[in-house]
Image (spheres, rainbow, N blue to C red):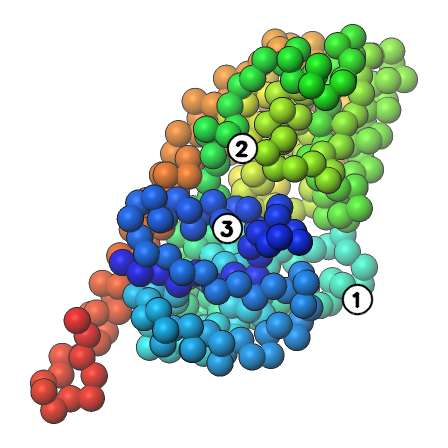
Amino acid sequence: MRILVVTNMYPTRAAPATGLVVEQQVRSLRVLGLDVDVLHFDRAAQGPAVYWQLGRSLRQKIAAVQPDVVHVTYGGVMAFLATRAVRDLPVVVYFRGSDLLGSPAESPLRRFVIYLGVLASRRAAARAAAAVVDSENLRAALPIAAGRAAWIVPSGIDLEQFKPLDRERCRAQLGWSTASRQVLFTASPRRPQKRFSPGAAAVARLQEAGHAVELRVLDGVSHRDVPTWMNASDAVLLTSTHEGSPNAVKEALACNVAVVAVDVGDVRERLSAVRGCHVAAPTAEDLASKLEFVLAGPSRVDGRQSLASISLEQTAKQLVRIYESVLVADDARTPEVDDAGARCRS
């Protein structure tokens, strides 16, 4: 089976950490034996102008590689244009977060631009042969018809990279104090949707109450070093305004590190089966209270065992089943034609 992945987020030499989730997905599909080509529209580097020739570029790529399925990840304007340009092949669109939910923490102008992207996503979902989402809350954000048929496939976790490591050794590598408890905020404070303020205020409350605790921020850290940061931490903190299936939570659980997170995306589902992890209200008071429980509890949680179904291999297998499903449906819609017909399918 040949798949063409169309994406606006993919690692480049200038931005090696961008779109790692997509790159891992592509690599996992190739491991399963699929022939996967990638068409990358570098939105971050080139701006909206990168989409001006999207239809033509996509059709040229299809003519060159002859894919069975076009897989678009993520939604927004790119998905809108791709589903408009490709009408004779099944198109699968993978939605992951703000492309369906918007971003309420942004400035008014930015919120409006993102809202236009949400409208584009909904239109793309209605056209697509299949919509794939990270979590149930994203499926609920789809148009009714598309939502009923949508597949939920959380982004997979590399369980070889994210695994329990010796905490003291990791702290020594990072030069962290062993006399303090360490809380890790896993995103840049400059990203409004990650809502840094209540997390920082929660840790400040614990410090004022006499707890020896430090807040660490995972910003500008190479992805290969993230497992060391997580394993050096006593707790991972997530306070986002919205999420699909946040990788930070799953990566922490893969390392058996406790998580305190607000109720976004599939967080409640992920944490419900792991004793020692907590869902909190997005307030400094409740976050501090839940962190206090974690810091008084065992040094590790048993989170890794809950992730077997979302390893990179397992999520890639789910995608293969989706591709097979849309190909069967596409064949069923394609009329049989004789030698005089204009089109036939092998």
The residue identified by callout 3 is 22
Residue type at the position of mark 2 = Lys
Element type at marker 1? helix
Marks 1/3: CA distance? Answer: 28 Å
Q: Nearer the viewer, residue 286 or 194?
A: 194
Secondary structure, mark 2, is helix
The residue at 32%/70% (across/down) is 66
Residue 301 % position (x, y): 55, 16
Q: CA distance from mark 2 to mark 1?
A: 32 Å
Label 2 sits on residue? 250
State the residue at coordinates (63%, 31%).
226
Q: Residues within 10 Å of mark 2 (few under 14, many from 20)?
A: many
Residue 180 visible, this angle = yes
Q: Give the left or right position of residue 167, taking residue 302 as reference.
A: right
Give the numbered dot on residue 109: 1
The residue type indicated by label 3 comes to Val
Of residue 226 and residue 270, the one placed in the foreground of this image is 226
- 268 to 175, vertically: above or below: below
- The tag earlier along the polypeptide, 2 or 1, is 1
Residue 206 in which image quadrant: top right
- In the image, residue 322 lies at what x, y percent? 32, 54
Name the amino acid, label 1.
Leu
- Residue extending furthest front? 13
Q: Which mark is residue 33?
A: none
In this view, 120 is above or below 221: below
Image vertical order of residue 332 relative to residue 177, above or below: below
Q: Residue furthest right?
A: 208
Q: Is residue 319 above or below residue 121?
A: above
Residue 91 location, x and y as percent? 39, 67
Where, by quadrant of the figure, is residue 177 drawn? top right
